[in-house]
Image (tube, helix red, strand yellow):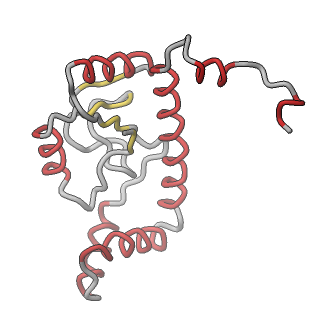
Amino acid sequence: MVSSGVKSILDVAATCELLETLGVPVLGWQTDTMPLFYTAAGGPPVTARVETAADLAAIAQAHWHLEGGGLLVTRPPDTSIDVEPLIADALAQAGANGVSGKDVTPFVLGYLHEHSDGRTLAVNRELIVANAGLAGELAMALAPEDDDMHEFLFEEAEPDDLD
């Protein structure tokens, strides 16, 4: 899974501890610490730092060869913003409004969007695109070159083929 780290409204340390307990390596894409979603750094150290998609693919293959399950690739945002004070305010406001359970996250996200002048929404959109791009790079690095899908993805498309 490619992600932008752990939502900082969660217990980040407990989340990382659970991942470690479950044997899920947390890999940092060009970072040494787990990103906190909107913030590029500040989380606990990752299991390993990875610089290239080829290295990431090699680590994933070795993990799976050893019968490991999932792994988490954390990618920091290109645009980092500090939202911790806003999150604290949002959580306090949620409590004051009686918002609880599964309704807290949407409330906090709405609060962040409103009180950050839309910066959190812009970063969130950038993260979606960047994470999908990295997942695609990993998929291509994992695909065998003799695979039909690899051939399909890299063959030249003729204009007539697009009809």
- Residue at coordinates 39% horizontally, 52% vertically from top-left? 38
In the image, taking residue 146 as reference, residue 4 lies left or right, namely left
Residue 138 % position (x, y): 46, 26
Q: Is residue 80 above or below residue 53?
A: below
Q: Residue at x 37, y 42 (%)?
A: 40
Identify whether 98 is placed above or below 44.
below
The residue positioned farthest toward the bottom in the image shown: 97
Q: In which quarter of the image is residue 83?
A: bottom left
Quadrant occupied by the N terminus:
top left
Quadrant in which the C terminus appears: top right
Image position of 65 with respect to 95: above or below: above
Q: In this view, does 129 lie to the left or right of 99?
A: right
How far from the left and from the top, in percent, is residue 159? 88, 29
Q: Where is residue 91 in the image (x, y as percent from the top left)?
A: 27, 74
Residue 146: percent from the left, percent from the top? 56, 11
Which image quarter: residue 35? top left
| Residue most extreme to the right | 160
Looking at the picture, does residue 37 appear above or below residue 20?
below
Q: Which of these two is toward me, 101 or 130?
A: 101
Q: Nearer the viewer, residue 89 or 145?
A: 145
Q: How many marks?
A: 0
Q: Which residue is drawn at 66% across and 23% down?
A: 152
User: Hey, which residue is sitting farthest front in the picture?
Assistant: 148
